[in-house]
Amino acid sequence: MNTVVMGARLIRTSGGCARNSAKRANGSKPCEAWVIDSAEREYRMRLHWKWMLACLSVLVLVLASAHLYLDHVIRDFWVHHLEQRLLREVRFARVHISEVANTDEGLVPLVDEVGVRLGVRATLLNGQGRVLADSETDPSDLSALENHADHPEISAALQQGRGSSLRYSKAQDIEILYVATTVPEIGDGDFVLRLALPLRDMGHIEQLIARAIWMTSILGLCLALLLAYATSRYISRPILDAIWFVKNIASGRLKHPTLRIGSTRELRDLGTALDDMRRQVQAKIGQITLEKSRLEAVLPSITEAILVTDQRGRILMGNQTFEKLFGVSDAIEGRMPIELVRHRDVQDAIEQTLSTGQVAFLDLTRSDGRERHFDVQIAPILQDDHIAGSVTIFYDITELRRLERIRKDFVANVSHELRTPLTTIKGCAATLADGALDNREASQRFVQMINTHADRLHNLVEDILDLSRIESGALPLEIDVYPVQEIVNSVVGQIRPLAKEKNLAIEINTKENVQVQCDRKLIEQALLNLLDNAVKYTPEGGKIWIQTRDFKRVKNVDEDRRNRHGENATQTRKRRIALEVKDTGIGVPLSDMDRIFERFYRVDKGRSRAMGGTGLGLSIVRHIMDAHGERVYVESEQGKGSTFGLTLPRK
C-alpha cells in the first residue's frame, strides 16, 4: 500500500465494506477507506465552512454591487427620460403662452390651464425671480411666495435659455424635477416658465427592481452554496493531506513517508514539490544547526563585543561581551542598535554599511563610571551578492589609549626631568670655565651644585631602569617566606639617619612571628620608597608609624584581585596582612588620590623637586605590588597625615 501516514491523524486501512463484499468474493482487492479521527473531522468541517463562507461572501458582494449599480443606472435613466419629457412640454407651453395678451391678468388662467393639461405644476416668473402666476397657488397669495431668482433652474434659464434641477421637497417629502425656459415673446424684459413634476412613481419602480434582484440573488446563493459544498468535499482531502504534511515539517518531524495526494497531474506535482521541500528543509536545518553550534562555540570565547543585524538594521544576535558591555538584560532580537548602544554614530554607520556595502570604521567613547574607548568596525554580510546584514565588532582600546597617554606623558616628563639638572650642570661648568675656578669658594659651590644634580640624574636613571625592569617582567621574582619584622628592621635602619635630621620619631608596631611570601628585595624597595616619602613630607618633630594589621580591617579591599584569583572574602582576609606606613605629614588632597601612583605625578611639584624626588617612587611601589599580584592603597586626610599600605600573603 503506497500511501502516507499523517502522524496518526489520517490512517489508511483495509477492511470490509458491504458494497465491496461481492468484489472480494470475486477475488478483487479489499476496499480501502480513510479512517478519520475527530481532530481531522473537525478540521475538514472548518475547511468546508470556510470555503462556503468565502463563496457566499463573494456572491453577496457581487449581488450588492449589482444592486447598487442597477439602482443608480435605472434611476438616472428614469430621471433623464422625465427631464426630456418636461423639456418638450415646456417648449409647447411657451409657444401657447406667447399667443395671449402681454398682461398679468391674461397669464394667470393660461398658466393654470398649462398645469392642468400637462399634469404638472406650472409657474411663470419675471427676470427678477418674482412669481407672476402659479397653477397651484391662488393669485391673491402670489405676493407671499418667496423670490425664486436663486433657484438653480431659474438661474440657468436666465443665463442659458433653459435649465433643470432635481431637489428634495421637505414640505411634500418627495423629490421634484424642475425644468425652466425663458419666454421672450410675452413682452419687454425676461420671463421664465417653469414646470415641476413630483417623482412619486420612482419609489415604486425601485421597489420592483429591488425585489427582482433579491429573488435572483437568493436563487443564485442557493446554487452557489451547493456548488461550494460539492467542490469543498472534492478538494478537501488533498488539501488536508498537504496541510498535515506541512505541519509535520513545521514541527520538525521531517522523517516520514513520501506524500502522495490525489490522482490528477497537478496534485501529484504538488505532492512531489512538497516532498522535495521536506528533503531540502531537512538538509538546510542540518546545515544551520551545525553552523549555529560552531558559532555558539566560538562567540563566548571572543573577548570583543559583537553585534549582528539583518538587512533592515534590526539586531539578530549579540555575544555575552556585548550584553555585559552595554548592560543588556532583556532580549535584544528585533531591536535597533541605537536602543542599546545609545550612540547615533554607531546607528548611522550600520545604516551606511547596509546601504553601500562598504566597511565602516569609527571611534567610540563610552562613560559608565569610567571612560572607555572602542575602535568600532562595521562590515556587511554578503549572501549571493546581496547585503543580508551587518556585523559590528567593538575593539576595546582603552588600555592602548591609556598606555599611549602614559608613554607621551613619560617622554615629556623624562625630558623635563632631565633638562633641569643638565641645564644646571651645563651652567655651572660654563661658569667654572669662564674663570670661577680661580675663586675657591665659588668653585666649591658650583662643584657642589654639579654633584647634587648629577646625583639627581643618577637617581632618576636608576628609578627609570628599575621601573622598566619591573614593568616588563625582565626582573624575575624570587618568592620565599620572610619574617615581616626582619624586612621592617632592615628598611628602618636605612631611613633612620634621614629621620633624625628632621627630628622625626619612628615607631614600629608589627606583629611578632608574622611571615609573608614575597620577593624580599623588591618589598624592601617598596617599603623604603614609602618611608622616604613619609620623611620628606612630614614636618620636623612629626612621627612615623610602621604597623601591620589584618587585611579585613583595611577599608579599600581589592575586589578585583579576588575576582581574578577566584577567592572569596573570607579566604582573602585569612591569608593576607597589610603592612602600613603612617605619618603626620601634610596629607594628600582628595582630588590627587587617584593619580599619585602615576609616573612623575607630584602633588606639590616644587617641593618634591626641592627634596630631591624623581616622581617615580610611588609608581615603582605600585608596579612592585602588581608584579606580586598584590596592591598598594592610600588613606589620607589633608593637613593631618597619610597612611600607605602594602597587602602581602601571609604564611
Image: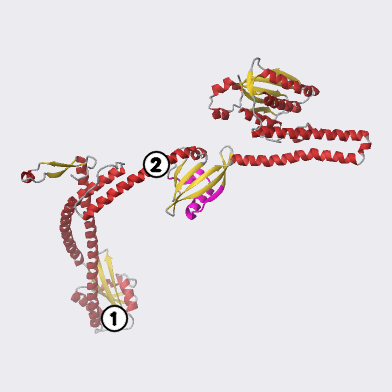
> Residue 541 in the image: x percent, y percent?
78, 22
The magenta region covers 334-362
| Foreground pick, 100 / 46 | 46
Number of residues whose C-alpha sits closer than 10 Å to that of mark 2, classed few (under 14), some (14–19) or many (20 or more): few
* Residue of label 2: 290
Whether label 2 touches label 1, CB < 8 Å = no
| Foreground pick, 447 / 636 | 447
The answer to whether residue 591 is above or below residue 97 is above
* Residue of label 1: 183
Q: Residue at x 81, y 40 (%)?
A: 423
| Foreground pick, 182 / 502 | 502
> Residue 646 in the image: x percent, y percent?
65, 25
Is residue 353 highlighted in magenta? yes
Q: Residue at x 17, y 50 (%)?
A: 233
Q: Is residue 28 visible?
A: yes
Is residue 502 highlighted in magenta? no
Circle 1: residue type: Val
Q: Residue at x 29, y 49 (%)?
A: 276
